[in-house]
Image (cartoon, coloured by chain):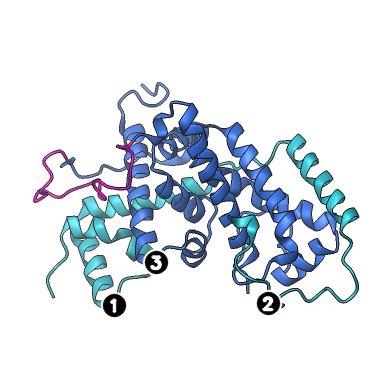
Chain colours: A cyan, B blue
Amino acid sequence: MSAMGCDEFVEQVTAYLDGALDTVNVNRFTGHIADCDGCEVYLRQIRVTIAELGRLPGPGLADRTTATLLAAFRDRSANETPSEGSQDVRGAGFPGPLSGSS
Amino acid sequence: MPEADQKSPGPALPADDVVVAALRLGDEEMFAALLSAWSPGMLQVARAYVADDHAAEDVVQEAWLGVLRGIDRFEARSSLRTWIYRIVINKAKTRGVRDARTVPMTSLTPEKNDAGLSIDFHGPESPYPDARRRPPVVWPSPEGEILAHEVHEHIVQALDNLPARQRVVITLRDVQGYTSDEVCAILEITAANQRVLLHRARASLRSALDRYMTAPSGKEPTR
């Protein structure tokens, strides 16, 4: 099995991190790290990039939007109280995909 | 079993069938919990397709209203979260196309597509003449030297420059921490396709961070 070069290493980084490489290629990948300082740094930078993305603040909805949606939820519940015996909707043979998703 | 939702604040949500039953019965607390757990990710995903944060907020609101209309007919063919994300993406795409007709939007220009180099660092044997040939240099330690909010600003800017599909994938995988399987289900793409999009997106983000981290005057005065 041939050694892995820098270009292939960079191309395989995501597969490696996803655990999608087979054993042979994992060994070629880690073998390359041992030989190449540049690619070791590259891999570390990719990991830092992923970690920083995971630390991005994620603001939620504006208070007004949340209030609008909660009001819509209450309206819906008030208007369509489920009738007796309608609880098992799943598998009840509703045709086609949901209109809400199209 | 639903995946652990690493980023959602507060207690984990119960299983889908419990959540769906609660929504159908009008359990407002459950609906509020869903809003706060999933809206941040939905806003970020919507933002990939529309021009600004305001439009993304509209899209997410519309999507939740769609969820309320459709919840009685939800058949659990996918997870609830996957179903809801598909609704957001459909609405965001529609809104993005509509806005593009009336608003000149640089983010939808043809050159911003998924093609192009998928790698951003090349060895000396690289066939790409424009590719950078210098090996990556070690970034300064994040401790103290780099202001977190500056890094975040650069990341947000770099996300803005990504094609929509790459942006959605990296947002769901790396910002929200969803699994590859869930992202494939949301976008209805193969694992291989998803990995290519994620790979290109991460490479672009790394390059953007590299430019910031290694720019001689990129940081606050240190000398």
Which image quadrant for residue B217? top left
Label 2 residue SS: loop
Per the rendering, the mark at residue A23 is: 1
Q: Position of residue B15 (x, y in %)?
A: 71, 70
Q: Position of residue B106 (x, y in %)?
A: 40, 29
- Between B57 and B207, the residue placed more toward the observer is B57
Chain letter belonging to callout 3 = B
Q: Amino acid at mark 3?
A: Ala
Query: Mark 3 to mark 2: distance in Å?
Result: 30 Å
Q: Which residue is mark 3?
A: B191
> Tag 1's secondary structure?
helix
Please name the residue shown 35% across and 70% down the image.
A20
Asked if both marks, 1 and 2, belong to the same chain, the answer given is yes
Say if residue A75 shows up in the picture: yes
> At which x and y percent is residue A79?
88, 54
Q: Is residue B26 magenta?
A: no
Name the amino acid type tagged 1: Thr
Secondary structure of the residue carrying tag 3 is helix
- Marker disc for residue A93: 2
Q: Is residue B212 left or right of residue A69?
A: left
The chain holding disc 1 is A
The overriding secondary structure of the stretch rendered in magenta is: loop
| Observer-nearest of B83 and A21 | B83
